[in-house]
Image: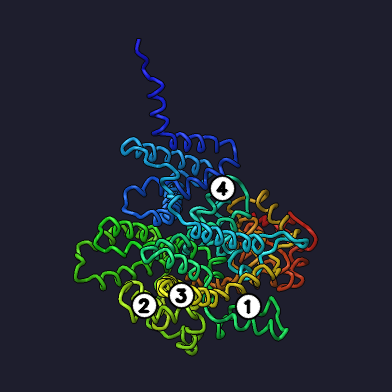
């Protein structure tokens, strides 16, 4: 009797579906094991959606390296977001989404076969050792700096050093609040207001953490991975101009900047060096644009915005390809909730690309880009930040006081080389995009906080670095080494500042308090805390709970009117300094569940503990040294 399945049949099935089987095993094993779930989350959010879809687009091998993780991160986050809206955000929802992606992958394999062999897909043999060394160096440097400077334990508590002192706690608040019931998210530090910030890179981190449990050390690791992906995207954008140009551009794009290192070396030579003052960035000063590596370390939305923008620019190299235009529109449409400034920059680059290809470009082909960008419309209309587009010179008035010199000093040698490249034909889309991005902050105001217009210079840095890399690749090696070295020295001060400073985020007492809050208070609790400075609040960035208000620039930068911010600040002042009636009014107005007294509160409101102890409906539920938490028990 003939066997239904022969050994050959089994081997054939196994060869065709081996990745599907592996993905299924990982997804199922993740339900009982947090450690397997953590690894599985990396696989499904960085690889699987991209591996499903890369075969549908006309991509070069060096473009696949950037496409797969970028597309996977954006698609997985959006898929889990909409799935969670339907059934609730939970560990189980995330794991079932992985099973769904496995099914899609199996369907694609069934219809098209399994072309994926790791060595074939990644083209490892085709990648030169210099390129591998470059990518390994980028990841290693970023990882070391981040692990030393972000969530590092010390004898005194948790350290968030260097330039991470301000922005990193904000991202921890978003991540931990989402994973503690804040979904769909309201602003974790302005309770009751829907989230308008482009928070999806933090949502992606929350997804990966959720399947494991509390893991704050995940953030620095993921930042290093995203910085590596940024390197992939720059390499893909520049590679058509040669491998040498791609390597130079990637180095400059990741570590380059202006001439602020003169201050560092002057301090070293004169014996006045101080790690906390001799820094490559001076807010509102001569060197007032924060260096690119500084931004990559701490500005998490840029970690998706920048590489997607670079990848979209690479797709615009062939404006006659409907396939690549569609992919550019798809990536742009998925981008809005990750970085809406990057979304605008992609649209700007598209307009520039159409203008420079106008004679041979069919305007009907524009629909292949424009239609998929409609994926952003639900977010734009539902919770997009208020429009503030207007003609304005506020950036020049407040920051770039002498624009020509200011930009030459801050953007340095690569900017000069990029300008020199204009004498040669070619790369017109990069040149036009660079000029528009540099001009926009000088003539327009688009962001709620005028300072945030500086981000357009960060996006301009991509064409600047690529144009500089192309120009330098055509010169002698000694000149390449010299100019590249002089272009990246500013990152040395960034690294020194980040690893050399020791700014505390939470004492060990505050850390224990944050863990207690996670375990002993309802997930939808709102805490009354101080707003000054309101940055390192353990009930928020460790405990994951909502607060009435916080550091002023966070809600201000998200588009909350200053009048509303000041009103909450006045209410908080009244609650901590007034009588029981004034406190009750604030508690009722903002649905406060707990009142927190910590270091900032004791500094800003001396004697508040004694006043709270005298109020009968405030029940002390946690005490550790001078740290107090009171539960509101109003009938």
* Label of residue 375 in the image: none
Q: Are marks 3 and 4 in contact (CB under 8 Å)?
A: no
145 lies above or below 105: below
Q: Residues within 10 Å of mark 3 (few under 14, many from 20)?
A: few
Query: On the rendered structure, is 153 left or right of 209?
Result: right
* Label of residue 476 in the image: 3
Closer to the observer: label 2 or label 4?
Answer: 2
Residue plotted at (44% across, 37% down):
19
The first of marks 2 and 4 along the sequence is 4
Q: CA distance from mark 1 to mark 3?
A: 32 Å
Residue plotted at (40% across, 56% down):
62
* Label of residue 210 in the image: 4
Residue in the foreground of this view, choosing between 8 and 86: 8
Residue in the foreground of this view, choosing between 369 and 532: 369
Which quarter of the picture shows residue 583? bottom right
Q: Is residue 74 visible?
A: no
The first of marks 3 and 4 along the sequence is 4
Query: On the rendered structure, is 536 left or right of 609?
Result: left
The first of marks 1 and 3 along the sequence is 1
Q: Secondary structure at mark 3?
A: loop
The first of marks 1 and 2 along the sequence is 1
The first of marks 1 and 4 along the sequence is 4
Closer to the observer: label 1 or label 3?
Answer: 3
Query: On the rendered structure, is 511 left or right of 327?
Result: right
Q: Residues within 10 Å of mark 4 (few under 14, many from 20)?
A: many
Q: Which residue is mark 1?
A: 279
Q: CA distance from mark 3 to mark 4?
A: 51 Å
Residue plotted at (69% across, 63% down):
159
* Label of residue 436 in the image: 2
């Amino acid at each position: 009797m003939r066997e239904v399945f022969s050994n050959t049949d089994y081997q054939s099935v196994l060869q065709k579906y081996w990745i599907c089987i592996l993905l299924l095993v990982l997804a199922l094993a993740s339900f009982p094991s947090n450690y397997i779930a953590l690894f599985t989350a990396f696989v499904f959010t960085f690889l699987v959606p991209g591996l499903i879809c890369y075969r549908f687009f006309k991509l070069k091998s060096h473009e696949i390296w950037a496409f797969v993780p970028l597309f996977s991160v954006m698609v997985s986050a959006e898929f889990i977001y909409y799935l969670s809206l339907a059934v609730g955000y939970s560990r189980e929802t995330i794991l079932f989404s992985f099973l769904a992606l496995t099914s899609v992958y199996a369907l694609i394999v069934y219809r098209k076969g399994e072309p994926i062999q790791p060595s074939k897909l990644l083209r490892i043999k085709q990648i030169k050792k210099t390129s591998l060394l470059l990518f390994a160096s980028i990841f290693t440097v970023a990882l070391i700096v981040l692990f030393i400077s972000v969530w590092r334990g010390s004898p005194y508590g948790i350290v968030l050093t260097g330039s991470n002192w301000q922005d990193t706690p904000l991202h921890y608040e978003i991540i931990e609040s989402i994973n503690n019931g804040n979904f769909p998210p309201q602003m974790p530090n302005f309770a009751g207001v829907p989230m308008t910030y482009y928070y999806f890179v933090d949502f992606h981190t929350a997804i990966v953490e959720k399947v494991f449990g509390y893991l704050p050390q995940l953030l620095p690791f993921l930042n290093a991975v995203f910085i590596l992906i940024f390197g992939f995207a720059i390499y893909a954008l520049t590679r058509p101009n040669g491998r040498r140009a791609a390597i130079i551009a990637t180095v400059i794009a990741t570590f380059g900047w202006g001439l602020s290192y003169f201050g560092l070396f002057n301090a070293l030579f004169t014996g006045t060096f101080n790690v906390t003052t001799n820094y490559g960035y001076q807010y509102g000063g001569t060197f007032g644009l924060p260096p690119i590596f500084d931004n990559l370390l701490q500005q998490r939305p840029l970690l998706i915005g920048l590489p997607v923008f670079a990848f979209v620019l690479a797709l615009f190299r062939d404006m006659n390809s409907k396939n690549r235009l569609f992919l550019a529109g798809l990536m742009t449409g998925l981008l809005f909730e990750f970085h809406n400034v990057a979304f605008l920059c992609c649209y700007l680059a598209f307009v520039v690309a159409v203008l420079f290809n106008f004679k041979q470009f069919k305007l009907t082909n524009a629909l292949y880009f424009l239609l998929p960008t409609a994926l952003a419309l639900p977010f734009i209309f539902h919770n997009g930040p208020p429009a503030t587009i207007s003609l304005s010179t506020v950036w020049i008035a407040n920051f770039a006081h002498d624009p020509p010199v200011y930009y030459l000093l801050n953007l340095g040698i690569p900017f000069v080389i990029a300008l020199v490249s204009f004498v040669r034909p070619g790369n017109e889309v990069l040149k036009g995009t660079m000029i528009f991005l540099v001009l926009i902050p000088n003539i327009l105001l688009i962001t709620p906080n005028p300072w945030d217009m500086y981000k357009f210079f960060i996006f301009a840095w991509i064409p600047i670095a690529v144009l500089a890399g192309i120009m330098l690749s055509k010169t002698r090696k000694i000149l390449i080494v010299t100019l590249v070295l002089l272009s990246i020295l500013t990152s040395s001060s960034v690294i020194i500042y980040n690893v050399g400073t020791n700014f505390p985020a939470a004492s060990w007492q505050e850390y224990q308090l944050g863990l207690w809050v996670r375990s002993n208070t309802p997930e939808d609790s709102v805490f009354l805390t101080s707003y000054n400075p309101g940055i390192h609040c353990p009930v928020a960035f460790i405990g994951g709970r909502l607060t009435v208000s916080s550091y002023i620039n966070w809600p201000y930068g998200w588009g909350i009117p200053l009048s509303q911010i000041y009103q909450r600040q006045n209410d908080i002042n009244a609650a901590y300094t007034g009588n029981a009636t004034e406190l009750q009014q604030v508690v009722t107005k903002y649905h406060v569940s707990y009142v927190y007294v910590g270091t900032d509160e004791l500094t800003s409101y001396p004697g508040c503990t004694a006043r709270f102890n005298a109020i009968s409906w405030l029940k002390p539920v946690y005490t550790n040294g001078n740290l107090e938490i009171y539960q509101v028990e109003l009938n």
